[in-house]
Amino acid sequence: MMDAKFLVILALAASASAGPLSVQESDKCSETCTDNGKFKYNPGYIYSYDYQVDTATSMSGASEDTAKLTIQTSADVEVLGPCEFALRLRDTRLLHSDNAGHMKAAHREEQFRRGVEASELRFSFQNGVVAQICSGQSEDAWVTNFKKGILSSFQNSMDDLTKAQNLTETDVAGECRTEYKLVSDGYYSVSIKKSKDILSCTER
């Protein structure tokens, strides 16, 4: 039996500078806009985030060894206009564990980096929900799917950012039970923890 652990972390690094999400090939993703200003993203600004995925896979009863894989990237989200956003990736790393358990560059790290950093991904951001993405014709499906995973973490479906909420959220993983907890509510910022029950997901 194979046991796998999967952890996704999306953290704000700097600012001010589903069912599967639908894909549209167009210069403009947002044909309509329902933004009520909840997130206060400013057009013309780029917001930068650190994104990291860690996976650990082991074979029960076979050995104590665990194979680990880590993906790290900086995600720049540019606000092009109301509900019109663009995602760009940079400084991407693909790491895996060696026989001694040390993390090192994976064999195809450079190929992976070139693939995910080659082009931007436009998306429609409707009041916290990634309603639609607009990928380029030349972008490979695996690249688009990876970026959709990042946007899944970026999405926030809370009705009120000052109150905890449990809901069913639609993103790249399907329709999943999702819990939002308010960690801190400061004068200048709000910290929220988002937890998704992957086993509850339907309509994948």
Image (cartoon, rainbow, N blue to C red):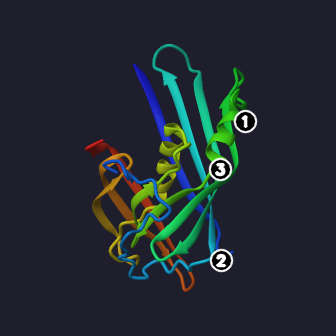
Q: Is residue 39 left or right of residue 168?
A: right
Q: Kindly identify which residue carries mark 2.
A: 16
Helix, strand or loop at mark 1:
helix
Residue 155 against residue 204 in the figure, above or below: below
Helix, strand or loop at mark 3:
strand
Name the residue rendered at 63%, 75% in the picture.
45
Q: Residues within 10 Å of mark 1 (few under 14, many from 20)?
A: few
| Along the viewing direction, whichever of 204 and 163 lies nearer the viewer | 204
Q: Return the disc, 1 or 3, that comes first in the chain's sequence.
A: 3
Q: Residues within 10 Å of mark 3 (few under 14, many from 20)?
A: many
| Along the viewing direction, whichever of 59 and 41 lies nearer the viewer | 41
In three-dimensional space, the C-alpha distance between marks 2 and 3, rounded to whole angstroms, equals 19 Å
Q: Is residue 161 left or right of residue 16?
A: left
Name the residue rendered at 34%, 51% in the picture.
18
Q: Kindly identify which residue carries mark 1.
A: 110
Rendering coords of residue 169 (x, y %): 31, 57
Residue 11 against residue 142 in the figure, above or below: below
Residue 143 found in image quarter: top right
Image quadrant where one finds the N terminus: top left
Helix, strand or loop at mark 2:
loop
Q: Residue furthest top?
A: 62
Q: Residue furthest bottom?
A: 187
Name the residue rendered at 62%, 45% in the picture.
116
In this rendering, which labeled residue sits more in front, label 1 or label 3? Answer: 1
Picture disc at residue 73: 3
Rendering coords of residue 202 (x, y %): 25, 44
Identify residue type, mark 2: Ala
Name the residue rendered at 29%, 63% in the picture.
166
In this rendering, which labeled residue sits more in front, label 1 or label 2? Answer: 1
Identify residue type, mark 3: Thr
Q: Residues within 10 Å of mark 2 (few under 14, many from 20)?
A: few
| Along the viewing direction, whichever of 192 and 84 lies nearer the viewer | 84
